């Protein structure tokens, strides 16, 4: 079975704060076909995101597909509030890195 890397099918993978206590991950696919394949496969579910980020599934607040932009938006709780002692990314702009290594089995 062949695999595909998220970085090969997404044109934009980014993160940012969604307030001081939440983080948003945006994945914008290069084309509608890949977006639909990933969306319909369910490969980006709360369990997978939780495992990828080392958090509880309950900390994955939402996974929203946005058809007009061929995008998926994931919101999760930040492990530390933005700007708290120990926070190393006050803007949440570097938290997309775990997504960069994401590999899918061949999507039907």
Image: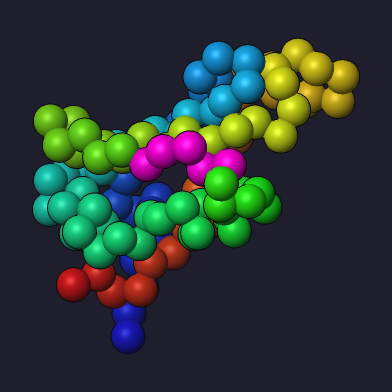
Position of residue 55 in the picture relative to residue 74 (left or right): right
Image coordinates of residue 66 in percent, x first then y, are: 21, 34
Picture layout, residue 19 above or below residue 67: above
Q: Residue at x 55, y 20 (%)?
A: 17
Magenta span covers which residues? 59-63
Q: Quadrant of residue 92?
A: top right
Position of residue 65 in the picture relative to residue 85 (left or right): left
Quadrant in the picture for the C terminus: bottom left
Q: Which residue is drawn at 40% across and 50% down?
A: 7
Q: Nearer the viewer, residue 8 or 50?
A: 50
Q: Nearer the viewer, residue 41 or 31?
A: 41
Image coordinates of residue 29 in percent, x first then y, are: 25, 43
| The furthest residue to the front | 58
Picture layout, residue 63 above or below residue 17: below
| The furthest residue to the bottom | 1
- Report how many numbered discs are placed on residues in the image: 0
Q: Is residue 96 visible?
A: no
Image coordinates of residue 24 in percent, x first then y, are: 48, 29
Q: Which residue is drawn at 87% across and 19% down?
A: 85
Q: Can residue 60 be found in the magenta stretch?
A: yes
Q: Is residue 107 visible?
A: yes
Q: Which of 8 and 107 is in front in this view?
A: 107
Quadrant in the picture for the N terminus: bottom left
Picture layout, residue 19 above or below residue 46: above
Magenta highlight: main SS: strand
Q: Can residue 15 be found in the magenta stretch?
A: no
Q: Which residue is drawn at 65% across and 49% down?
A: 55
Image coordinates of residue 91 in percent, x first then y, are: 62, 17
Picture layout, residue 68 above or below residue 105: above
Q: Describe the colour scheme in one phrase.
A: rainbow
């Amino acid at each position: 079975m062949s695999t595909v890397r998220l970085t090969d099918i997404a044109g934009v993978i980014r993160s940012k704060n969604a307030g001081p206590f939440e983080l948003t991950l945006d994945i914008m696919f290069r084309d509608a076909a890949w977006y639909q394949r990933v969306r319909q496969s369910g490969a980006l579910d709360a369990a997978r995101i939780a495992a990828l980020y080392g958090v509880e599934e309950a900390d994955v607040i939402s996974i929203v597909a946005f058809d007009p932009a061929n995008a998926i938006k994931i919101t999760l709780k930040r492990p530390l509030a933005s700007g708290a002692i120990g926070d190393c990314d006050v803007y949440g702009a570097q938290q997309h890195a775990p997504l960069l290594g994401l590999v899918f089995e061949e999507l039907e």
